[in-house]
Amino acid sequence: MISRRPLMLAGGLALAGCASTPSQASLGRVVVVGGGFGGATAARHLKLGGGESVDVTLVERDAGFVSCPMSNLVVAGERELASISRGYAGLERLGVKRVRGEVTGIDAAAKTVRLADGSRLAWDRLVLAPGIDFMLDDIPGLAAALDSGRAVHAWKAGAQTLLLRRQLEALPEGGVVLISIPKSPYRCPPGPYERACLIASWLRRARPRAKLLVLDANPEIQSKRVLFERAFAQAHAGVLEYRPNSELQQVMPDGLARFEFEDVKADVLNLIPPQRAGDVARELVNVNRRWVGVDWLTMQAQAAPGVHVVGDAIFSAPASPKSAHLANQQARLVAAAVLQLLKGEPVNPAPVLMNTCYSFVTPTEAMHISSTNRYDAAEKTMKPVPGAGSLSTAANAQEAQLAQAWAENIWADSFGS
Ligand SMILES: Cc1cc2nc3c(=O)[nH]c(=O)nc-3n(C[C@H](O)[C@H](O)[C@H](O)COP(=O)(O)OP(=O)(O)OC[C@H]3O[C@@H](n4cnc5c(N)ncnc54)[C@H](O)[C@@H]3O)c2cc1C
């Protein structure tokens, strides 16, 4: 269902008192909100393409960034969190101004954003890349369980990743780990199944009598299905039990997880909540009450021209996952389009976006799926190019090395470090 409601952005903000300094840049000011894969890439490529002619300010609430890609290896004890963390010095070296803060409101008419400390930033073009937030109200008890640490999502990397790791290390022999997967769409369709494989690999070595239950709200595995089914049935047989059509309904105060057909008592509760566009984009949401619909030539929100949105917060194109690779690709598209719009030049009428998602099935074996989408002018969306995608025939050691190289490349392209 597509719901369209009138745009209600925070209004009445005066430009006087804006935190941004008057710019010498000839093209204009771009504010980027969110310093993850989408926002960092947009800020970096705006500067790479526009140099001193464009004034770029990146607003991010956190001091640094922790990558979700490769975080399942941290959960499994195979990598350190520091090795998947990046700072913003690479962007600052290019001239990106960084503001550490939380954006709490957007005034599209006055072209300002408001920050939690009361300051404001003025822009000629705004790029939002806030990622996802969780729909906790849908599942009674889930918010309280996550707040208390009884349950862990680890679906935003950082403290949650380490908490899940610590809880696994504290698992008694013969204990039970539960992973609950929400209905699609959620960020990184293969991510939960990769996590299941890596946790199962660790259990086999460290807690051979423990069990991993994977309860999936979806009717089947959501990505690389045949290859994950093979991994579950072969490498992880006897440790991992997978059940489709199992949606989390409630979490009781004692940690009992209630599903439609069963109650599960587990020692470690990795409950991945249902997701929607990040809070700061909520006024731009116009698809299924969850996602921001965009014009794919410029990534402008359908509900607010002048405000560009990239990454997990948008309504994905057909057969496109919510991935770091696509957030990076969309951000490169937006950087080029914003510079062209600021110059009054036409934008690329036929953009192409590519995606590759690697998944580990053991710490030393990985597999990939890739796709290419091209703009379809008749349908005004990015459509998969037939025959331009690929899927591994089997997980193997070489692809595990390629996966690590892919991560280094995308961190370098997004953060410049
Ligand atoms: C376990 C796991 C594994 C994954 N593996 C892969 C993989 O192998 N390959 C792949 O391509 N993708 C992978 N993904 C998906 C990938 O992490 C996301 O698709 C990607 O992070 C989306 O980028 P984004 O910029 O939209 O959001 P994010 O990277 O989450 O960045 C959003 C940023 O915005 C900031 N922010 C939000 N709101 C505000 C605000 N109001 N004010 C200031 N700052 C704000 C946040 O702090 C955050 O830094 C994985 C995800 C998970 C959970």
Image (cartoon, rainbow, N blue to C red):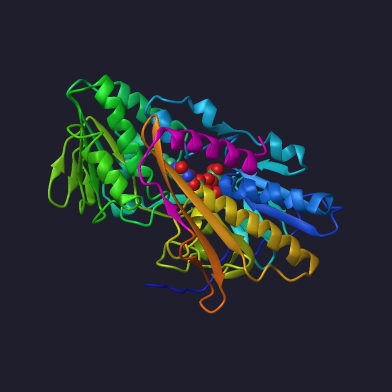
Residue 184 shown in magenta: no
Q: Position of residue 95 (x, y in %)?
A: 78, 42
Magenta span of residues: 389-417
Q: Nearer the viewer, residue 225 or 414?
A: 225
Q: Position of residue 248 (x, y in %)?
A: 23, 49
In the rendered view, does 349 fall on the left or right side of 242?
Answer: right
Q: Is residue 293 above or below residue 212?
A: below
Residue at point 81% right, 50% down? 51
Residue 323 seen by the camera: yes
Q: Position of residue 376 (x, y in %)?
A: 54, 73
Q: Position of residue 168 (x, y in %)?
A: 31, 26
Residue 104 seen by the camera: no
Q: Nearer the viewer, residue 414 or 142?
A: 414
Residue at point 67% right, 61% down? 13
Name the image quarter holding residue 195.
Answer: top left
Q: Secondary structure of the magenta portion, mostly?
A: helix
Residue at point 78% right, 70% down? 344
Name the image quarter holding residue 295.
Answer: bottom right
Q: Quadrant of the N terminus?
A: bottom left
Number of dots carrying numbers: 0
Q: Nearer the viewer, residue 103 or 133?
A: 133
Residue at point 70% right, 53% down? 121
In the rendered view, does 32 fall on the left or right side of 366?
Answer: right
In the rendered view, does 29 fall on the left or right side of 414?
Answer: right
